[in-house]
Image (cartoon, helix red, strand yellow):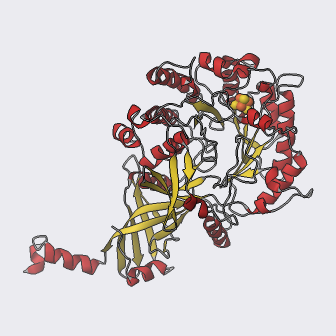
Amino acid sequence: MTEEINWRTQELSLDEVLQKYPDVPRIWALKVDVQRRGVVYTQAAKDMINPAIHQVNTGTIALFRTTQDYTPESLIMRDGSYLITNFDLNKNKAFREPYVVDAIDGHIYIMDQGKVLEEVWYWEKPEFYDKTASNGEPFNKYIQARPQRIDINLNQYCHFWDKPGEGCKYCPMTPCFKMRHQTEEREETKYIAEAVREALKQEGRFSAILVTGGSILSGEHLFDDELDAYIDLLQAILGDFQVERVPSQLISSAFDERQLERLYRETKLMTYTTDIEVLNKEKFEWICPGKAHHVGYEEWKRRLFAAVDVFGRGNVTSGVVLGTELASPNGFASEDEAYRHVIEEAEDIISHGIPLAANVWRTAPGAIFQNQKNPSLEYFIKTYREFDRLAHHYGVNPYTDDYRRCGAHPGMDLLRI
Amino acid sequence: MAVELSQNIREAIADSSSVKVVATIGKDGVPHAVVKGSVSVNEQGNIEFLDILESSKNNQNLVYSIWYEKLVAIQVFRAPLESYEILAKPVRSITAGKEFEERYRQLHEVFPNVDLGAIWQLEPVEVRDERLQVRVQEQEKTYPILQHLDRIL
Ligand code: SF4
């Protein structure tokens, strides 16, 4: 693995960042850094996997991966939060050493430079992972699981990639779809619904359902076919619940008011997310050219705000791939400049009652940005800390995309207190 | 440093008629106390209880405590006069997995209409015998100046 030899001297370490920002919890800062640098598993750690109990990366559909290793799907921390580690590492251009997951005396730890940092546990697999649908296919072909959430990726291809150069530059989903030589974009709703019914038999396992997928641009109006597909699916999987709104989340393209009204009226969906991705108009236009071309930054934001009127304050969030605004060559020239712009824009969105579910940007193999270097730990900590101050100030906690319903947006963990 | 809970305390905790109160502080520094019938001692000798409401002040404060290494006070009272205070460090919050599901099912057998937020595990670091007669004797021995004169005339 090629790392920059002196990378540790070029940026503040975890300890130094904690000294500079003593108000952030150590366990949380480590989590951010693990997401930033990635992890590798020692053989001893792999030997701790019990395939009868644990969820393993082999055999499930991983939409964002080019490789499938025999490693645990992800980790659970002692504060009850989940640490998503099931992403590809760019082994040819890692820039920094990943953290190591090792086993000592029957316990599993995150380590760095031989030092034990935190005890962790592996995710347990749900019972439906060992069962098959009525057509004989494994259920986990249709739906996947996080420790408390059912994940459904409806469209596994994103049509912003139809026109060369219009896909989001950090996103590996469609490149991976092509690398797998996959032809079917979508699984049948009937089997997805069957899988969800089976999954829900396990008492205490699931507290949320996430539905998402790549954008579909076709239809009478832009995204109409995508909306129809989601309504059809949501009716099939949420229809049986005896409540008006089911704890569930849709992450989709930015629907306009008419589409949002339909989505709300025709389904039992509780929360809605549409990802602004990059918190700056100019950088968004460079990084997400398809979204910029078909909808535009200001219009995407306007639709996001309109969703609050339909779904209610606290029931709308927006995803951000934090750090991409610093990609080269057109990103911000410095972390300080990026921070100023990002926070200003974040406040505008959060003040509308929309918390930001920001991922730590990792340079995923297959993505256009695969050989880029992501920002320093200090940048992520400082920015998440400010997002949290704003979310507390404007008083919104969505209880989605958080420490247990998701695990991929460490900033949301801070809303626990 | 972890301390071992004595047999007396374990019995008092296990007695379903005893009252167990968990007291925490959060980032605002305001104390919060709640009666927790589910307090028990697990195989490792740690205190364990269920937090039913994920959005509760108790859960928030426990997260604050595990993040910033703050202690939690657990008061155990068994009639007529038995009383202990255990100071404990939160070591783990279990929010998923077989253990969580097992407790979720057990909880539903007793309270079918509630959810389960988390199982909290806390390591005892200090135990104080809070029985009145023990505390009175302690004070008289350690601080003989602290008493009204008419009592000793
Ligand atoms: S909209 Fe962008 S981030 Fe979302 S799937 Fe398409 S390319 Fe990826």
Up/down of A326 relative to A403, above or below:
above
Please state, as top left, top right, bottom left or bottom right, where the N terminus of chain A lies in the image: top right
Up/down of A176 relative to A247, above or below:
above
Q: In which quarter of the image is ligand 1?
A: top right
Residue A153 location in percent, x, y? 77, 42
- The image quarter in which residue A135 lies: bottom right
Q: In this view, does A369 lie to the left or right of A380?
A: right
Q: In this view, does A277 lie to the left or right of A7?
A: right
- The image quarter in which residue A289 lies: top right
Residue B46 location in percent, x, y? 45, 71
Residue under the point 67% across and 73% down: B109
The reply to whether residue B109 is in sight is yes
The reply to whether residue A239 is in sight is no
Residue under the point 76% across and 18% down: A294
Q: Is residue B37 left or right of residue A246?
A: left
Residue A143 location in percent, x, y? 78, 50
List the single residue furthest toward the right.
A135
Q: Is residue B100 left or right of residue A241?
A: left
Q: Nearer the viewer, residue A149 or A62?
A: A62
Up/down of A126 relative to A184, above or below:
below
Q: Which of A92 and A134 is in front in this view?
A: A92
